[in-house]
């Protein structure tokens, strides 16, 4: 469970998060809202890249705000970004191993953990293939493998399937759905693809102008009139 109380972030005169209070209890959680709603800022606060002006965050009883960002990674917080972070000149293995080495003490079990993460996300290439030689779908899977390696506890996914065709997005969704059971981590998925969110997430929170306008079971949230009119073009999405 992640408990967030009165989380507020200001950049100069702009309030990016305005008193966000929410409880995320299910293993698969969605985070939706229009561009500029505060989704990436929310992830940046959890990750330790942004310090809030007020509020608290507790994840499985741990005060995340009391930990510097590198300790949050060792605690088990992982994330992907909208822009790819994998290094094209390095191999799939080395890219995933880099995250393992920065989030895990010692070296015992590194190779097994890295290969397990690569297999889990469904990469069929030779692990020693260079990332620069991969197609867009495979590179996204490398990003996901980097997020699930090394026993994560919370995985933040920032539009992991953006730009992918429907079939590859569905494959990505299948991998994401397996993270809680196979990896043992809670997932928060931020995305504009309502079909992906409705197909993956058990509960969803909606941000608008830095405030939570609703939160709860995904099916109920996506039928909420405010969500339908503001983000879904007047047509509800059903899973």
Image (cartoon, helix red, strand yellow):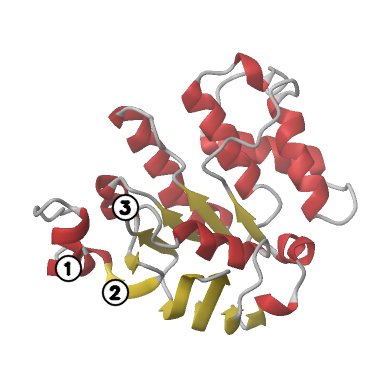
Residue at image position (51%, 18%) is 135
Look at the numbered discs 2 and 1 and tell me whether their residues touch, using CB distance below 8 Å: yes
Against 1, residue 237 (above or below) is above
Residue 29: x percent and y percent?
40, 63
Q: Which element type, helix, strand or loop, lies under badge 3?
A: helix
For the residues labelled 2 and 3, the Cα–Cα distance comes to 17 Å
**What residue occupies the far right of the structure in this picture?**
106
Residue, disc 2: 213
Residue at image position (32%, 55%) is 34
Give me the disc on residue 226.
1
CA neighbours of label 3 inside 10 A, class few (<14), some (14 to 19), many (20+): many
Of the image marks 2 and 1, the number of the one nearer the N terminus: 2
Residue, disc 3: 197
Residue 84: x percent and y percent?
59, 35
Of the image marks 2 and 3, the number of the one nearer the N terminus: 3
Residue at image position (39%, 61%) is 37
Q: Which element type, helix, strand or loop, lies under badge 2?
A: strand
């Amino acid at each position: 469970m992640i408990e967030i109380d009165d989380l507020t972030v200001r950049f100069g005169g702009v309030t990016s998060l305005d008193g966000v209070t929410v409880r995320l209890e299910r293993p698969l959680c969605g985070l939706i809202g229009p561009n500029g709603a505060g989704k990436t800022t929310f992830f940046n606060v959890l990750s330790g890249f942004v310090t809030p002006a007020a509020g608290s965050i507790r994840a499985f009883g741990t005060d995340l705000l009391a930990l510097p960002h590198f300790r949050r990674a060792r605690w088990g917080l992982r994330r992907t970004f909208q822009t790819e972070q994998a290094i094209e000149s390095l191999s799939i293995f080395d890219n995933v191993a880099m995250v393992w080495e920065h989030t895990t003490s010692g070296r015992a079990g590194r190779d097994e953990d890295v290969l397990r993460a690569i297999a889990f996300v469904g990469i069929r290439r030779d692990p020693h293939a260079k990332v620069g030689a991969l197609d867009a779908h495979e590179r996204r899977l490398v990003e996901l493998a980097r997020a699930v390696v090394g026993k994560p506890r919370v995985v933040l996914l920032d539009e992991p399937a953006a730009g992918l065709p429907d079939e590859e997005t569905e494959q990505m969704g299948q991998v994401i759905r397996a993270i809680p059971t196979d990896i043992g981590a809670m997932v928060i998925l931020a995305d504009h693809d309502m079909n992906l969110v409705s197909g993956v997430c058990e509960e969803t929170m909606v941000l608008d102008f830095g405030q939570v306008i609703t939160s709860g079971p995904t099916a109920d949230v996506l039928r909420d009139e405010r969500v339908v009119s503001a983000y879904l073009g007047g047509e509800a999405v059903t899973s």
